[in-house]
Amino acid sequence: MNKKATLVLALYFLCTLFTYAQERKNLPTPIFSEQSIGYMEEATGWTYSKDGKWLWAENSTPMYRYSYREDKLKDKRNELGLDNFIRLELKELYMGKDTLVILYKSYNYGKYKYETTLKGWKEKIGAFYYVFKRSELNKFQKIKDGEINDLRIKLYDAGNVKNIKSKKKVEEEIAQKVFLKSDFEKELVLHIAPYKEKNIVQFHIYSLHMIFKIAEGILVDHRIKNRSVFGHNYLFDNTYYETDYDTFNKFIRLPGYISPEEREAAAAAATAEEKDADKDTDE
């Protein structure tokens, strides 16, 4: 084979290589918005006890137990409750050209090094997260006052990130786990019962598998007579979180809500109008 033929053959194989070579594409890195859509850091958790008494704790729904069993409180695992949270937050999540929304709940969990003697307790930070389309936020405007609302939101990813080093690292750790799936088989459940006249909102936030109805996003799947209370309105007969109206609306803005700042601004504007009207009358 002469040099010319060899060169032509080499060029042919080179062109074939470029034609069939796959283009390497990296998945976009999730980026959290700096501005929060909403957040919450304070709520009271309630659980109906085995002997018919309501138990409460700050930022935690107490373990299901007899109200008089104070000895149970010595176990640090019980302090974590059926569920607990450090912070609930809603943010925009940028995935390449797409803008989604992520809701995450940071929480405390832990274990004993020596479980039989309850020694060597070590507590850590974890986070449940849920990713969905921004358009789903419109469902918040359908929340009705004075009744239990069961909002279901289609998810594209959800997960549980553990062993987070600090509260400041929560979003960084979640970003490493997010992987979108169009056929994701879990849905976000926002169980919300606002009572404006009483100045309270009762709620619970978790996910359900759409086929098997397995509840996730809580530390313990609370069950009565071996039946989960999650996914049903009688959840509120057994366990929930409660906070005041203004605090909840900093997290999720309810229909018709007017913040204290907006009320103050409206009052100031009304006062200014009255003064202007009086001045016009005097003139």
Image: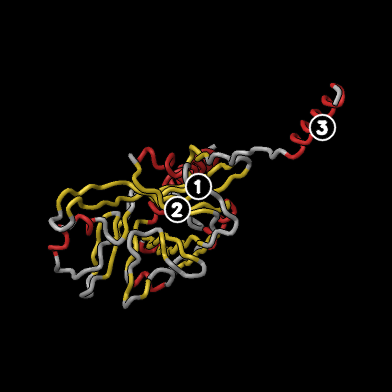
| Total labels drawn | 3
In percent of the image, x 42 and y 42: which residue is there? 173
Q: Which residue is mark 1?
A: 178
Question: Which quadrant of the structure image shows residue 67?
Answer: bottom left
Residues marked 1 and 2 touching at CB (< 8 Å) = yes
Kind of residue sitting beneath label 1: Val
- Inspect this view and state whether residue 206 appears: yes
Helix, strand, or loop for circle 1? loop
Residues marked 2 and 3 touching at CB (< 8 Å) = no
Mark 1 and mark 2: Cα distance apart in space: 8 Å
Q: 10 Å neighbourhood of mark 1: few (<14), some, or many (≥20)?
A: some
Tell me where residue 96 appears, x and y as whole percent.
61, 40
Helix, strand, or loop for circle 3? helix
Question: Which quadrant of the structure image shows residue 154?
Answer: bottom right
Tell me where residue 52 appears, x and y as whole percent.
23, 75
Kind of residue sitting beneath label 2: Gly
Q: Which residue is mark 2?
A: 159
- Sequence-wise, which precedes: disc 1 or disc 3? 3
- Sequence-wise, which precedes: disc 2 or disc 3? 3
Kind of residue sitting beneath label 3: Tyr
Observer-side mark, 2 or 3, equals 3
Q: Which mark is residue 12?
A: 3
Observer-side mark, 1 or 3, equals 3
Tell me where residue 55 appears, x and y as whole percent.
23, 65
In percent of the image, x 50 and y 61: which residue is there? 186
In percent of the image, x 45 and y 46: which residue is there? 267
- Sequence-wise, which precedes: disc 1 or disc 2? 2
Q: 10 Å neighbourhood of mark 3: few (<14), some, or many (≥20)?
A: few
